[in-house]
């Protein structure tokens, strides 16, 4: 096996995104897009809950060695997600719509999925 394949996180992150999408649907969200990309980066899931557009960051952890999944969305990541969300709203002509940022934190070792609504907001 090649060295880089040992540290390839894609299967874990993909599994986390699949679990998150299912949990969101079960909670009443409608998934609009997965892995929305542009030159700025990627939003894991774009969904709609009632009349609110929800930008969802999925964090998956297999253990607690590097902290809890829900602690992994730092200020730098939040700024990036805000810019991506603004680009998505512009591209889809959704300015004026209510929007928020949720985090789905998945701890695989505990079989725990937590949807954190309004995890952060755009600074005023």
Image: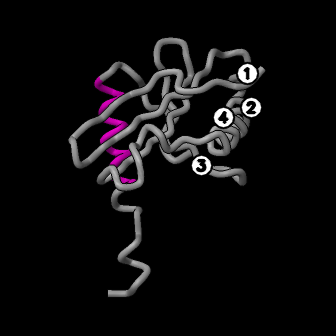
Q: Secondary structure at mark 1?
A: loop
Q: Is residue 63 magenta?
A: no
Q: Nearer the viewer, residue 94 or 14?
A: 14
Instruction: Return the residue at label 3.
Output: 42
Q: How is the image coloured?
A: one colour
Provide the residue span drawn in magenta.
13-26
Residue nearest the observer in this picture, 119 or 41: 119
> On the rendered image, what quadrant is the C terminus found in?
top right
Q: Which residue is mark 4?
A: 85
Locate residue 101 relative to residue 11 in the image: left or right: right
Asked if marks 3 and 1 touch (Cβ < 8 Å), the reply is no
Q: Is residue 113 above or below residue 61?
A: above
CA–CA distance in space, label 1 to label 4: 10 Å
Q: Earlier in the sequence, mark 1 or mark 4?
A: 4
Q: Which residue is mark 2?
A: 90
Is residue 14 a member of the stretch shown in magenta?
Answer: yes
> Circle 2 — which element?
helix
């Amino acid at each position: 096996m090649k060295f880089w394949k040992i540290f390839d996180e894609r299967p874990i992150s993909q599994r986390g995104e699949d679990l998150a999408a299912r949990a969101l649907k079960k909670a009443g969200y409608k998934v609009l897009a997965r892995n929305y990309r542009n030159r700025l980066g990627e939003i894991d899931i774009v969904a709609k809950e009632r009349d609110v557009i929800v930008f969802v960051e999925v964090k998956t952890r297999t253990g607690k060695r590097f902290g809890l999944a829900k602690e992994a969305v730092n200020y730098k990541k939040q700024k990036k997600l805000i810019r991506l969300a603004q680009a998505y709203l512009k591209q889809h002509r959704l300015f004026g719509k209510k929007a928020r940022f949720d985090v789905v934190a998945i701890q695989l070792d505990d079989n725990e999925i937590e949807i954190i609504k309004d995890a952060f907001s755009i600074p005023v």
